[in-house]
Image (cartoon, helix red, strand yellow):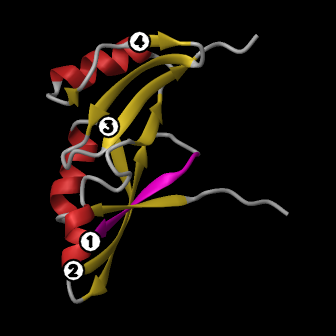
Amino acid sequence: MSQAVNCVAMLVREYDEAIAFYKEKMGFEVIQDTPMGEGRRWVIIAPKGTSGARLLLARAKNDAEKASVGCQAGGRVFLFLQTDDFARDHARMLGLGVKFSELPRHEPYGTVAVFEDLYGNKWDLLMPAAVT
């Protein structure tokens, strides 16, 4: 039996503003954008060339969901964007206006810095330490 986490749902205010941020600021691509009627869409995005988990953009539809946009993890880091070149991606994202809440730091597991998406969700930009 083979299983994998395929998608993680992320609440967003609007599809198009979320797509624009993830494409322009983070270099993601739209994998699927299928209309589902009544203004709903099935929108899947992912870092270019990834074979890992993807994000399903879910437009908040009621007050409880709208209140959760940007704080799905209760203020903790919610998602981890792994890179093979921390300096390159950190500099590119800073140059595009992505807000980092700390300077890069070196941990036993790798080089990391926390940044926020357009809604305030916290992410780690992470380059894992070499495993010996």
Q: Which residue corresponds to the image point at 29% horizontal and 53% vertical from the top-left?
A: 71
User: Spatial distance from mark 3 to mark 1, Cα to Cα?
Assistant: 26 Å
Residue at the extreme right? 1
**What residue is disc 2 on?**
62
Q: Earlier in the sequence, mark 4 or mark 3?
A: 3
The reply to whether the C-beta atoms of the residues labelled 2 and 1 are less than 8 Å apart is: yes
Report how far apart the C-alphas of labels 2 and 1 lie in the structure.
Answer: 5 Å
> Residue drawn at (79%, 60%), measured in percent from left and top?
2
Mark 3 residue type:
Gly
Q: Identify the mark at residue 105; answer none if there is no mark.
A: 4
- Residue 65's label in the rendered image is 1
- Where is residue 60, by image quadrant? bottom left
Please name the residue that numbered disc 3 is placed on.
27
Q: Does the segment drawn in magenta span residue 60?
A: yes
29 or 111: nearer the viewer = 111
Identify the mark nearer the N-term, 3 or 1: 3
Contact flag, marks 2 and 4 (Cβ < 8 Å):
no
Frontmost of labels 2 and 3 is 2
**Residue lying at 32% horizontally and 37% vertically, measured from the top left:** 27
Outermost residue toward the front in this view:
74
Q: Is residue 60 visible?
A: no
Instruction: Count how many numbered circles sit on residues in the image.
Output: 4
